[in-house]
Amino acid sequence: MDRKEHWQGVFTTKGERDVSWFEALPAMSLQMMESAGLGPDTCVLDVGGGDSRLVDILAARGLDCLAVLDVSGAALHRAQERLGDLAGAFTWIESDVTAAWSSKPMDIWHDRAVFHFLTTVTDRAQYRAHLLQTVKPGGAVIIATFALDGPERCSGLPVARYSAETLAEELGSEFRLIEAVRHEHQTPRGAMQPFVYARFRRERSPAPILDGKDAAAPAVFAPRGSLPAPSRTTPWFRRTCRAAARQSWHWRPPSRFDRGCRPR
Ligand SMILES: C[S@@+](CC[C@H](N)C(=O)[O-])C[C@H]1O[C@@H](n2cnc3c(N)ncnc32)[C@H](O)[C@@H]1O
């Protein structure tokens, strides 16, 4: 399957609202960006941005360091046409995310519904290499994919489905999971698609490997405010955290622990 051909076909034959992923307001993405400290000086890269309206909204908020990458030139062209003169202020990268491309260092890497199309280990490794090259230390990575109970295909292509934990495993220890949210996207035709949105922070230095005695301070996920104060060393604590991560929905590292969740 030629990816470029596939996506060019989509964006030259279908209207904005004919595609299942259309959303008039990318509210979840914006919410996560705000949590990541979005401001007028923030540099944002929308990976596989297609003709999403995210760039319009960020521009309206006064951001001028914006880049959109997509394998389909037709998709980028549609977004550019919509933006008019404003489009010239931004960077447009027509490339497969897994191919050779580069951009200036970014504060926020945003990807809604692209990573899940990367169904081979090689493609995901390339994606991760670009993450490491592009995201500033301390910067944010926001990835939205179909959840474990989400559709098995999108736009006629097979997808991989994720939980926040399995996404974190894919990204590796340089990226710390900060929060994750389950979101049920309603397609223009009224179908419901479960997504997981996960926000990571790029570590400023390599994360320590927890083993032996160090594991006494585990970093785990937990639903907000729902955990009693446990002994951090117990199997119960680890089981509780694993269960919490499975249920998800909206959890963050609880504030009384000084460490975020690290699902390793
Ligand atoms: C499901 S759409 C999502 C579009 C946009 N992120 C949104 O939320 O509206 C997937 C987008 O990713 C692009 N895409 C798919 N695979 C890609 C790849 N390997 N590299 C770059 N872009 C890709 C497609 O052209 C399309 O615009």
Image (spheres, rainbow, N blue to C red):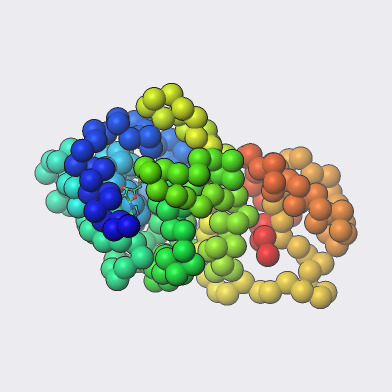
Q: Is residue 183 above or below residue 213?
A: above
Residue nearest the observer in this picture, 204 or 122:
122
Q: Is residue 245 above or below residue 172?
A: above
Q: Residue at x 69, y 48 (%)?
A: 245
Residue 102 visible in rendering: no
Q: How far across and how far down the image is residue 127, in percent?
A: 42, 65
Extreme residue in the left direction: 85
Q: Residue at x 49, y 67 (%)?
A: 121
In the image, is 49 to the left or to the right of 153? left
Residue 56 visible in rendering: yes
Q: Quadrant of the N terminus?
A: bottom left
Task: Tell me where residue 212 sits by quadrant.
Answer: bottom right
In the image, is 69 to the left or to the right of 237? left
Q: Residue at x 41, y 43 (%)?
A: 154
Q: How far across and how far down the image is residue 214, in percent?
A: 78, 72
In the image, is 209 to the left or to the right of 84? right
Residue nearest the observer in this picture, 235 or 59:
235
Q: How far across and how far down the image is residue 58, in percent?
A: 31, 43
Extreme residue in the top direction: 190
Residue nearest the observer in this picture, 18 or 240:
18
